[in-house]
Image (tube, rainbow, N blue to C red):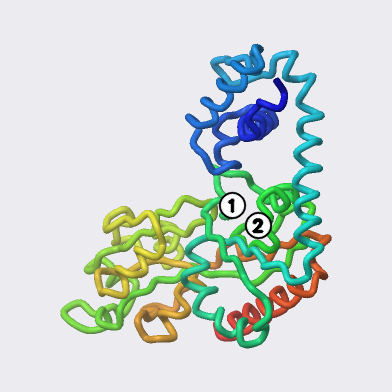
């Protein structure tokens, strides 16, 4: 019977049992809570036992599940470690670099040609995911075991820098700044001071992550009280909000690093020199055991140098 058990269901059970939450397991495995529930039901049916006790306030493991969980967790840890070692044994392995989609599109990709020119023999696998942003809806850290599980060599994350089991390098701090098309500096109501925002549409980036800047905080820091911070157009992704600003549809509040290419190209301007320093920053994260691998080290050194130049230009 053991050989007929679905591997995926065992993986889902191990994650759900570790978190005592179907929702947290779904976030970790990038599937839906409904899929987690179905996998658990399938496994319980095949084993002929109940694995979880459902309560109004959450889940608890049955005695049978408690007995099997430690060895199952150990087995998965050994499996992912073995796969990671196999990959690491190949000096020419492709580097897998994981980051938020906004950072990939707005900061990394415009600079990536310089890495290929410097290191033409290294191939990259760029994976973009919002789960790398510190968020109330996802884990606060990227534990080392998650790197191994997903075969991630390097991650770039917007957060507080607390990532156990990993080497962490701060890339750069960021500020929240207002941005608009140069066209809004002219016309009937040109943007000359923060008070002029009352004549313009506020563009909101409502991407869900902890540490996200908002208009209410910026307007308070700028001592502006005649502008309604809630009005305007709301977007669920920073790229959409920045595109709307480029098109002259309003003024967006965004992180300076994400708009650096648009600013350099003249598509966006900073109408007021009032930045809001953020507690969070961008960090480069690698597993301790692969930090000195030649390919990893080459990408890490290149990225840190690009970040240094970014900070010097601000």
Please state, as top left, top right, bottom left or bottom right, where the C terminus lies in the image. bottom right
Image coords of residue 308 (percent x, y): 65, 81
Q: Identify which residue is drawn at 52% across, 54% down.
A: 130
- Disc 1 on helix, strand or loop? loop
Q: Which mark is residue 290?
A: none
Which residue occupies 56% across, 69% down? 174
Task: Please provide percent x and percent y for residue 177.
Answer: 44, 71
Between 89 and 222, the one nearer to me in the picture: 89
Q: Secondary structure at mark 2?
A: loop
Q: Which mark is residue 134?
A: 1
Left or right: 271 as drawn, with respect to 15: left
Q: Position of residue 28 (x, y in %)?
A: 60, 42
Instruction: Pick whichever, 219 or 51, lies toward us.
Output: 51
Residue 61, quarter of picture: top right
How would you rate the neighbour count of disc 2 (Cα within 10 Å): few for under 14, some for 14-19, many for 20 or more? some
| Neighbours of disc 1 within 10 Å: few (<14), some (14-19), many (20+) | many
Quarter-of-image position of residue 277: bottom right
Q: Residue at x 56, y 41 (%)?
A: 27
* Mark number displayed over residue 160: 2
Of marks 1 and 2, the one in the foreground? 1
Q: Nearer the viewer, residue 190 or 232?
A: 232
Residue 91 position (above or below residue 9): below
């Amino acid at each position: 019977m053991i050989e007929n058990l679905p591997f995926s269901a065992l993986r889902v059970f191990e994650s759900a049992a570790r978190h005592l939450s179907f929702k947290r397991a779904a976030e970790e495995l990038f599937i839906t809570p409904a899929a987690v529930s179905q996998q658990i039901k399938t496994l319980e049916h095949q084993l002929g036992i109940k694995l979880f006790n459902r309560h109004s306030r959450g889940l608890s493991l049955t005695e049978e599940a408690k007995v099997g969980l430690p060895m199952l967790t150990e087995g998965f840890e050994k499996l992912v470690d073995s796969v990671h070692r196999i990959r690491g044994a190949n000096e020419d392995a492709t580097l897998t670099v994981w980051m938020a989609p906004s950072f990939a599109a707005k900061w990394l990709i415009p600079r990536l040609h310089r890495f290929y020119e410097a290191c033409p023999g290294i191939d990259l696998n760029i994976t973009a995911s919002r789960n790398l942003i510190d968020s109330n809806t996802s884990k606060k850290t990227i534990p080392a075991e998650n790197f191994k599980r997903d075969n991630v060599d390097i991650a770039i994350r917007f957060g507080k820098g607390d990532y156990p089991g990993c080497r962490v390098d701060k890339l750069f701090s960021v500020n929240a700044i207002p941005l608009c098309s140069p066209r809004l500096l002219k016309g009937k109501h040109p943007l000359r001071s923060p008070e002029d925002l009352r004549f313009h549409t506020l563009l909101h980036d409502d991407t869900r992550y902890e540490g996200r800047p908002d208009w209410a905080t910026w307007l308070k820091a700028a001592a502006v009280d005649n502008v309604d911070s809630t009005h305007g157009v709301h977007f669920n992704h920073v790229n959409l909000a920045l595109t709307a600003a480029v098109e002259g549809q309003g003024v967006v509040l965004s992180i300076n690093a994400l708009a650096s290419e648009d600013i350099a190209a003249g598509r966006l301007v900073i109408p007021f020199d009032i930045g809001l320093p953020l507690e969070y920053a961008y960090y480069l994260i690698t597993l301790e055991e692969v930090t000195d691998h030649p390919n990893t080290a080459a990408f890490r050194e290149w990225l840190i140098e690009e970040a240094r130049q970014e900070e010097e230009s601000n």
